[in-house]
Amino acid sequence: MLKCKVELIMPVQFNGKSFLSFLPTKLMQKANRDLTKGKITKNLICLAIPILMTYILQDAFEVVDMIFIGRLGAPELAAVAMSGNILRLVAVAGLGISTGATVLVSQSIGAKKQAEGENIALQSLLLSVFFSAGICGIGYPLSAFSLRILGAEPEILQLGVPYMQIAFIGLIIRFLSMTLNSIYRGAGDAVTPMLVLIFATFLNIVLDWLLIFGKLGFPELGIVGSAYATLIGRSTSVLIMLYLCFRGKGAISLKHVDWCVNFPEMGKVLKLGVFSAMQGFWRHFSRLGFLRVVASYGTSAVAAYAVCMRLRVIVMNPGFAIAGAVSPMVGQNLGACLVDRARKSAQVGNWLAVFVMIGIGVLFLFFPGFFVSMFTQDPSVIRIAEVYLRYLSPTFGFIAVSLVLGRAMTGSGDTLSPMVITLVSQCGIGLVLVILLSYTINMIGIWIGIALSNVVQGLLMWIRYRYSDWETK
């Protein structure tokens, strides 16, 4: 076990006050909830709403960022899009660490083992640094190679390489951000990450405008400016949350934790996280496979698929938020040996997500053209997307079941089952059906295959939840 002593540097002072004094720290301190007490529905909603707000903020920033980059031209858009696919795949490792942190921190807090939870939080943060540094060391020099694999043309390559290299440098900050958010939520506090993200998102958008276009005397950096803006904005949010942790003002306090590398504790995080990382990988791999088949039908089909995926995210955000609330609720209650309450939390979350997502899905089913036309006015794209939405919309209830019950099992420590179910339903059944049906009944076969994969995943997740001892993992 390696030990070292670290002092946290005080933040910059303005008129004798830290800039952090302007943040609502009192609200942050009251934000963490004991999820083993009180009404389950109230706890679920109070935890899910801030998580939903963070997803909405992230989506809003991505839209603004793409609008700014779109003003530069199509090559810049293509460079950022290609780089984004690679970076999302790489970020799967961070998802694994953050998932392991959520499970172990929530179970420790539920068992009233605060010191254990704080130590796990520290080990998760150190693990994030080690992994991201290693990936950065490999990915940075391979930026050009990875873009060539995706078929980037010389102009896109010239634009994308420096963008990706900056993003790889910022991978440490990205992993820390994911892990910190998960630690706070595992402790029952989803408000602090939301408030910090509001500040960081506003800063990011302002820096985007300044650095992409060279406004107010700043250099005009193009898409490189976007990469720097994201790095600075995300770094600011990480520094704020670390400051709160090390000053004892957060849901998890690292003020009195000994700085040490505890390999057994890191092993626990990795043991839980590795399957979540693999689940994310298989999910992303299947999406790339679907896209590859869709691309064989031309540009309009790809555009229609992209629009429907954007609409799908809008529907899934409430499901992601509810699932994100269910996981720490299950973890804390199982840590407190409240098995019935943990199962009840999963059931309430599942029905709430199904109700919300089916409600939105009905609108997409009956008015697909209205929603598609918000993103494109191309008649051929609208026509294809309308057909896809009519097949996709009836499966939103199954997607809700998959999201919530999968995260419930994850909260108990069973990360293997959701990974296997995702692999079987999306890569096994889904991808195979998409390929076969696209050749037998043309493009509609793709939409049928994707829809059936969603149904299968939801059913398998429900069967595993209903007929297994997942809560004893």
Image (cartoon, rainbow, N blue to C red):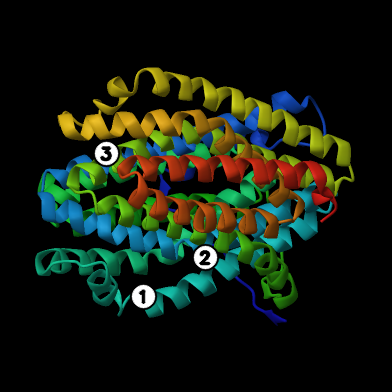
Marks 3/1: CA distance?
31 Å
Q: Is residue 454 left or right of residue 345?
A: left
Image location (x, y in percent) of residue 432: 46, 56
Q: Earlier in the sequence, mark 1 or mark 2?
A: 2
Residue 264, image quadrant: bottom right
Q: Is residue 308 left or right of residue 315?
A: left
Q: Which residue is at the front of the view, 269 or 323?
A: 323
User: Do the numbered discs 3 and 1 sit on residues whose CB atoms are within 8 Å?
Assistant: no
Q: Label 2: state its secondary structure.
A: helix
The residue carrying pointer 3 sits among few (fewer than 14), some (14 to 19) or many (20 or more) residues within 10 Å by Cα, namely many
Q: Earlier in the sequence, mark 2 or mark 3?
A: 2
The residue tagged 3 is 304
User: Do the numbered discs 2 and 3 sit on residues whose CB atoms are within 8 Å?
Assistant: no
Image location (x, y in percent) of residue 398: 58, 35
What's the amino acid at mark 3? Ala
Q: Label 3: state its secondary structure.
A: helix
Quarter of the image with the N terminus in it = bottom right
User: Do the numbered discs 1 and 2 sit on residues whose CB atoms are within 8 Å?
Assistant: no
Q: Can the viewer see residue 440? A: yes
What's the amino acid at mark 2? Ala
Instruction: Name the residue rendered at 68%, 60% in the picture.
Output: 416
The residue carrying pointer 2 sits among few (fewer than 14), some (14 to 19) or many (20 or more) residues within 10 Å by Cα, namely many
Instruction: Name the residue rendered at 49%, 35% in the picture.
Output: 316
